[in-house]
Amino acid sequence: MLSPQNTGLIQELFTGPERGRAFGLFGLVVSVASAVGPVLGGVIIALAGEDGGWRWIFLVNVPIGAVLLVAIARMVPDTRVEGESADARLDLVGAVLLGLAVLCLLLPVVALESGETRLLVLLAGVPALGWAFVAWERRLSRTGGAPLLDIALLRRTPGYGNGIVVGSLYFTGFTGVFLVLSVYLQDGLGYSTLATGLLLTPFAVGSAVSSPWAGRAVSRVGARSSSTPWPS
């Protein structure tokens, strides 16, 4: 829920080279958080104990979120045109269909790790729910509603479909790497949570250094047009 709001706000509030710099700074913040998060989590678990320390890892987000909500209300401008009312319509049906599809996909996989095989039958519901989600979104677009995902964007917006594919592949591998490494370093090699966090820090430092540079590079080079061939 949070990540799309970040990129959406940057896309809405910045244009031209400023947008590239804003995305670069966003990458810097994410990278710094990636470096601080595991180390801070290890410190919290070391201080609070392994039994209850993991709970504090989640609770620490509450005061941070409260401060950020106040900052957003004070700092983010209202970009609506004067006299324009906020569209409060929510695609609840689409959200439910998509949520059920994801549940039917992930729950059997998680349960299988503990030897539970009966839930594998839920996998049969994934294609049916996925088809129902796409059909509903198309219907909502035709009737002038506010769909959770406008399927037509895949055809009429240049680069949108390719961006989804690249983003899906990237985040599938990117988030999985840290989970696998964390489990391996702790359960496989016997490192503490704090030591594991410190071992993962160099990657975040490299990302923090490269993100602002990448933002400036995008502003200078620009996005490649779909009609422009790659240089030979």
Image: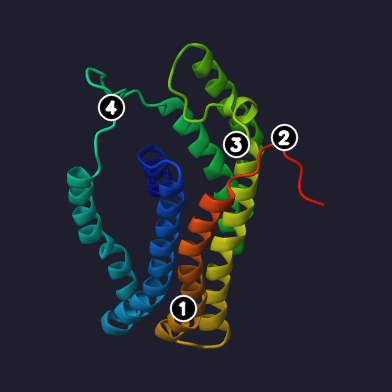
Q: Separation of disc 3 and disc 4 at Cα?
A: 25 Å
* Residue 227: image tag: 2
> Mark 2: which secondary structure?
loop
> Mark 3: which secondary structure?
helix
> Considering only order in the chain, which callout, 2 or 4, is on the residue closer to the N terminus?
4
Residue 6 image offset from top left, x and y in percent: 38, 47
Q: Pointers 4 and 2 in contact (CB under 8 A)?
A: no
In the image, what residue occupies the spot 58% across and 47% down?
222
Q: Separation of disc 1 and disc 3 at Cα?
A: 32 Å
Q: Which residue corresponds to mark 4?
A: 80
Q: Nearer the viewer, mark 4 or mark 2?
A: 2
> Considering only order in the chain, which callout, 1 or 4, is on the residue closer to the N terminus?
4
Residue 164 image offset from top left, x and y in percent: 60, 42
Q: Nearer the viewer, mark 1 or mark 3?
A: 3
> Considering only order in the chain, which callout, 4 or 3, is on the residue closer to the N terminus?
4
* Residue type at numbered disc 3: Tyr
In the image, what residue occupies the spot 42% across and 41% down?
15
